[in-house]
Image: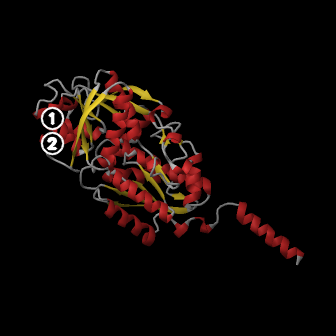
Amino acid sequence: MFKHTLLASALVATLASGPATADAISGDKIKIGVLTDMAAVYADLSGTGSVIAAEMAVQDFGGTVLGKPIEVVSADHQNKADIAVSKAREWIDAEGVDMITDLVTSSVALAVQEVGREKNRVTMATGAASSQLTGKSCSPRGFHWAYDTFSLANGTGTAVVKNGGDSWFFITADYAFGHALEGDVSDIVKANGGTVVGAVRHPFPSSDFASFLLQAQASGAKIVGLANAGSDTINAIKQAAEFGIVEGGQNLAGLLMFVTDIHSLGLKAAKGLYMTTGWYWDLNDETRAWAARFEQKAGKKPTMIQVGTYSAVLSYLKAIEKAGTDEAGAVAETLRSMPVNDVFAKGGMVYANGRMAHDMYLAQVKTPAQSSGAWDYLNIVHTIPARQAFQDPAKSGCAVIN
């Protein structure tokens, strides 16, 4: 009996402390869901490009983790939170999806992060912007990866005010992202001695900005801040040119813009605009090489959302490998303990509230004469260090760390 007890104790110790066993991976595979906008306002800056980026991460990781295959699935949430929640539940309950990423559109990300909390699944928002994701709505299993409204405000808002743009009028997308961006930029403007003279909110998405631009003109504000993104921003800038906003002495501030937006607008229309970004394809040899691989598959250069999705998926797989399991709690704890060093970020830090902090970049759109050709659109004006770019987690209002 004594011998059998010793053997049983040794077996328990081995199972507790030894290498991962076959059942360490649920369902005998890792399934990663890319839930995104495939055909509407944000499709160009996320969409199929995010799916391609996720697949590149799986390929670069080696295709398996802890001896089990990795599968990427994708779906279109149509920028509707109810559709996103339904798909997330179906993925988790019926298809065994382990992690959901991209989640462009803040209302979608906030809703799906709650599903992840309920179902014990990791969510990694790369496309959504609202700083609420790691603020009052934070989750022990939720992560926010590429950028947020706080970092955008710190970059573009601060630069524009210091450059003399000290009175603002906002044209804001009427949902969680737009509200958060307007609020964060307003705080930065006021903190730097500027004023906010007014704001108007437009339906999401929108194609007609005439009445909103007329209100912006009538306000007399030096800066018309566009607290929207994707085709909404593109349409607003094009129509602002028709109304002679800039010729009349006001300036536009695109508060969330992507290299794909500049490509759609053209340098003649976008030249001189300041924007804040978490990544640019032409930063160095490594980013140029990765962007070339992506362009071969997608037919265009990547946005920070798309390369951010690559980074999130790669980090998730590294965390599974290190934790020895795909159990969401263990993976989330491991993610918070790991630095992020990949093509997207160097020396990235995952805060206790789930915010991945990394350097951000203040950029200015080149003039046609400054550009060497297609996709050569930005001059990097200033690097914003990670701890300055993102909010101190202790001030975020996240209950996970309090």
Left or right relative to 241: residue 312: right
What residue would you read off at disc 1? 240
Q: Position of residue 189 (x, y in %)?
A: 34, 30
Residue drawn where x is 59% and y is 46% of the image: 337
Which amino acid, mark 1?
Ala
Residue 104 visible in the picture = no
Judged from this view, the residue extending furthest toward the bottom is 1
Instruction: Report the front residue among 13 and 251.
Output: 251
Instruction: Report the front residue among 24 and 299.
Output: 24
Query: Compared to 131, does 87 lie above or below?
Result: below
Q: CA distance from mark 1 to mark 2?
A: 8 Å
Which amino acid, mark 2?
Phe
Please report whichever mark, 1 or 2, sits nearer to the chain's N-terminal start. 2
Judged from this view, the residue extending furthest toward the right is 2
Residue drawn where x is 38% and y is 54% of the image: 109
Answer whether labels 1 and 2 touch (C-beta < 8 Å). yes
Residue 367 visible in the picture = yes
Q: Position of residue 65 (x, y in %)?
A: 55, 58
Query: Compared to 317, does 257 lie above or below?
Result: above
What residue would you read off at disc 2? 209
Residue drawn where x is 32% and y is 63% of the image: 82
Q: Secondary structure at mark 2?
A: loop
